[in-house]
């Protein structure tokens, strides 16, 4: 989770305030931490205690920084500060729109420190960055402290592993030696990422009532951004050692890259349903049309499932709308788990979902639909009732309509209409069943 942090207040426990409503972020007794579930508190404290051992191991026997180390530290500190100050507003906007993991690009400055600085200066780089990030984080102090410790420990342990493997002076590398050094850099990056996955991913998993791989580890786009950020950090390290003034170019690159990350997030927001994280109808329709065109050119099959939650209004009336939202999010998570990566899942509206199954005939579509129906029926959804008390929603059923291309329709609009008609037929015949569209 390179340069990643939990976005917002994991679990929504509120902020750290005094009785008059003023912020007291460093008053430990008033922290919202103590109002969190016991397992959350236990995990956080245990991991922070373990971090002390990790720091001790990383600092043991570390030589005093040299003048060259301090110069390199200063270059990274200036570069990171320029980056942070010039992108502060962008980061605030990105953070406010991010629901799970935020990739904040700091690895561009932290990872080179891992590779070329002694452990104390590595941690000092992280501390310098995190202190500046405090003003844009807008999170409870215990969350901020925990994520700061996870970043620092990840960097310190990655440095420890890297130095233990015996890296060579980069000025004297041969062709074969450079390959070995490149592999060591990859190992260091994996350690840096792995420690943050354990710390940040762990706290996100514990905080969420319905954790998924996406909510804990981020999307494919998030992970690609992490990999690119780490790669830029490695390049920064090479420049820092071989051509220090050129590190200034990386400050420019990171500002531009930060802007591109924000634009990518904005584009994703346009096609994403904010409640479930699935594609909205605009995003789903665009992706579905492209899939249909590919299948049509290849002369293949394609199936569509329209999934309608039975008696959804009863959930809202009985438990309240927040419970209904929890049901929708749980169903969305299930659809992500029981479908293939090539399937296109979206929210049609209200309590209805659409799943497009490329290269799927009628027999395979029926199996997929039954798998969705039975999985949703077996859900136990932890939520709250109208009074805020914890409760569990079970026994939710679905009516699913199936339409197959080209058997039932030849256009996307017609396929949606055919699947919708099949849903109504399923409901009229008792609900909790799968029905195929009638031939056009």
Image (tube, grey):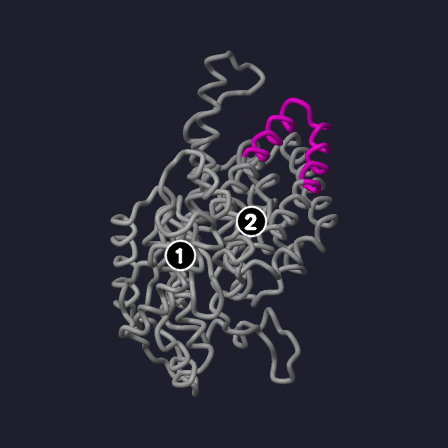
State the image coordinates of residue 181 (x, y, percent, origin top left).
48, 23
For residue 416, what is the image quadrant?
A: bottom left
Say which residue label 1 marks.
Answer: 202
Say which residue appears at 71% left-offset and 49% top-offset: 87
- Please state the extent of the stretch shown in magenta in the rendering: 231-256
Asked if 34 appears above or below 250 in the picture, the reply is below
Name the outermost residue toward the bottom: 387
Is 178 a magenta residue?
A: no
Left or right: 61 in relation to 366: right
At 56% across and 49% down in the image, what residue appears? 103
> Residue shown at 42%/77% (left/top)?
323
Q: Position of residue 62 (x, y in %)?
A: 50, 37
Residue 254 falls inside the magenta stretch:
yes
Q: Position of residue 265 (x, y in %)?
A: 60, 51
**Horizontal and vertical percent position of residue 280:** 52, 58
Q: Secondary structure at mark 2?
A: strand
Q: Main secondary structure of the magenta part?
A: helix
Judge from the rendering whether residue 53 lies leftward or rightward of residue 142; answer left or right. left
Disc 1 crowd, CA 10 A, few/some/many (<14, 14-19, 20+): some
For the view shown, which residue lies furthest in the front direction?
A: 440
Q: Which residue is mark 2?
A: 103
Which numbered disc, 1 or 2, marks the residue that appears first in the sequence? 2
* Callout 1: SS: helix
Q: Residue at x 42, y 35 (%)?
A: 161
């Amino acid at each position: 989770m390179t340069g990643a942090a939990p976005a917002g207040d994991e679990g929504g426990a509120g902020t750290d305030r005094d009785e008059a409503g003023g912020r007291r972020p460093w008053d430990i007794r008033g922290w919202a931490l103590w109002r969190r579930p016991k397992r959350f508190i236990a995990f956080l404290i245990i991991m922070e205690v373990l971090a002390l051992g990790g720091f001790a191991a990383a600092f043991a026997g570390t030589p005093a920084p040299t003048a060259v180390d301090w110069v390199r530290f200063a270059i990274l500190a200036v570069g990171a500060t320029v980056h942070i100050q010039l992108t502060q507003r962008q980061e605030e906007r990105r953070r406010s729109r991010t629901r799970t993991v935020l990739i904040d690009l700091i690895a561009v400055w932290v990872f080179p420190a891992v590779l070329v600085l002694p452990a104390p200066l590595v941690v000092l780089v992280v501390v310098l960055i995190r202190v500046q990030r405090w003003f844009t984080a807008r999170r409870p102090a215990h969350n901020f402290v925990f994520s700061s410790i996870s970043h620092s420990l990840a960097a310190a342990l990655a440095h420890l592993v890297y130095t233990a493997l015996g890296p060579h002076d980069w000025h004297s590398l041969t062709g074969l030696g450079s390959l070995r050094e490149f592999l060591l850099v990859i190992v260091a990056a994996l350690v840096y990422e792995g420690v943050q996955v354990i710390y940040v991913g762990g706290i996100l998993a514990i905080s969420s009532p319905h954790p998924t791989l996406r909510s804990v580890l981020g999307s494919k786009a998030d992970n690609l951004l992490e990999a690119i950020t780490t790669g830029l950090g490695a390049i920064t390290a090479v420049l820092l050692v071989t051509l220090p003034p050129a590190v200034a170019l990386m400050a420019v690159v990171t500002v531009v890259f930060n802007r591109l990350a924000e634009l990518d997030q904005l584009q994703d927001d346009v096609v994403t349903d904010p409640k479930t994280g699935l594609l909205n109808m605009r995003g789903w329709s665009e992706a579905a049309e492209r899939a249909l065109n590919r299948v049509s050119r290849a002369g293949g099959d394609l199936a569509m499932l329209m999934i309608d939650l039975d008696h959804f209004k009863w959930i809202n009336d009985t438990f309240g709308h927040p419970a209904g939202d929890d049901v929708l999010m749980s169903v969305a998570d299930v659809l992500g788990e029981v479908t293939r990566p090539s399937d296109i899942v979206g929210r049609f509206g209200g309590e209805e979902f659409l799943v497009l199954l490329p290269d799927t005939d009628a027999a395979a579509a029926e199996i997929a639909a039954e798998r969705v129906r039975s999985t949703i029926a077996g859900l136990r959804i932890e939520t709250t009732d109208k009074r805020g008390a914890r409760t569990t929603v079970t026994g939710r059923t679905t009516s699913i309509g199936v339409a197959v291309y080209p058997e039932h329709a030849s256009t996307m609009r017609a396929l949606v209409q055919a699947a919708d008609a099949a849903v109504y037929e399923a409901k009229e015949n008792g609900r909790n069943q799968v029905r195929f569209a009638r031939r056009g």
